[in-house]
Amino acid sequence: MTDILWVLSHIQLPDVIDIMLVAIVFYAIFFLAQGTQAVQLLRGMVILILAAFLTSQLLPFKGFSWLISTALPALLIAIPVVFQPELRRALERLGRTGSLLARYQQDEVVEQMIDEVTRAAHRLANERHGALIVFERETGLQEYVESGVPIEADVKSELLRTIFHPNTALHDKAVIIRDRKIVAASALLPVTHNPQYSGMGTRHRAAIGLTEESDALVVIVSEETGIISVAHNGRVIRRLDINRLRNVLLAFFQHRLGGRGWSKRV
């Protein structure tokens, strides 16, 4: 305790700036890792490293201090290996022009995107063409994006209908939408193992499986019945018409828009 008080009493302006720079670096790392499945693991590792370092400095255990000082460099080298997919996604996000300044979506643009998806789902349902349309939210879905065919295109009803037309090579799996763009088609999703949904078709079980592992929102169009459903958090909202589908999607995106603009329509 005396050592801590001595250190605090000798802190000067350069030391404060140094601490702030370190804090900014950690904040930037967490900001770039946001939206990936490993962000909680990263937080846990940082807390563990800090706790071990402080313990080794404050307690008079020479063996433990030697172990920590020896293991920390190896752990820092291992972090890029463990988080390779997340680091690549973070660098991709950093490289997108204006992505840090335009993080929050404009409500008009989101509404237009939802309208396009709603119209596509309605037409696909009428034509009995099955579809899986995934909205990536906070949890990153890069591993599923990489399982499909890369596409960087605006969300358009005509494009979605073309992708899910039975005569196309990409119709059989899922489309993934990220930041108002279709980033992948024919993406393979994990199928739920919950026996409660064993009687459902492959599309519904794949949608539920993804939402069990992430906070993604998935629109499902049944090829057999033409019924439109939405999956989220391992559950399904079924038998949606075009208006209810639109309202459900708007309600889920409302938190990103700060609650503006949707209250009269939902």
Image (spheres, rainbow, N blue to C red):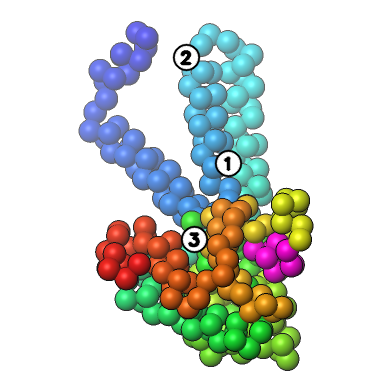
Task: Look at the picture and state if 249 lies above or below 116.
Answer: above
For the question of whether residue 154 can be seen, the reply is no
Residue 156 shown in magenta? no
* Horizontal relation, residue 247 to residue 65: left or right: left
Residue at 72% across / 56% down in the picture?
Answer: 197
Kindly identify the amino acid type of the residue bearing the numbered disc 3.
Arg
Residue at 67% across / 57% down in the picture?
Answer: 209
Is disc 3 placed on a helix, strand or loop? loop
* Horizontal relation, residue 111 to residue 80: left or right: left
Which of the two discs, 1 and 3, labels the residue nearer the N terminus? 1
Q: Quadrant of the C terminus?
A: bottom left
- Callout 2 environment at 10 Å: few (<14), some (14 to 19), or many (20+)? few
Query: Observer-nearest residue: 227 or 94?
Result: 227
The residues bearing labels 3 and 2 have C-alpha atoms spaced at a distance of 42 Å
* Horizontal relation, residue 197 to residue 180: left or right: right
Which of the two discs, 2 and 1, labels the residue nearer the N terminus? 1
Please tell me in which quadrant of the rendered image residue 79 appears. Answer: top right
Q: Main secondary structure of the magenta part?
A: helix
Measured from the top left, where is residue 259 in percent x and y?
Answer: 30, 60
Q: Are marks 3 and 2 in contact (CB under 8 Å)?
A: no
Which of the two discs, 3 and 2, labels the residue nearer the N terminus? 2
The label number, if any, that marks residue 137 in the structure image: 3
Residue at 37% across / 9% down in the picture?
Answer: 1
Circle 2 is placed at which residue position?
A: 58
Measured from the top left, where is residue 104 in percent x and y?
Answer: 35, 64
Query: Observer-nearest residue: 149 or 22?
Result: 149
Magenta residue span: 200-207
- Callout 1 environment at 10 Å: few (<14), some (14 to 19), or many (20+)? few
For the question of whether residue 136 can be seen, the reply is yes
Please tell me in which quadrant of the rendered image residue 216 appears. Answer: bottom right
Query: Observer-nearest residue: 169 or 92?
Result: 169
The label number, if any, that marks residue 41 in the structure image: 1
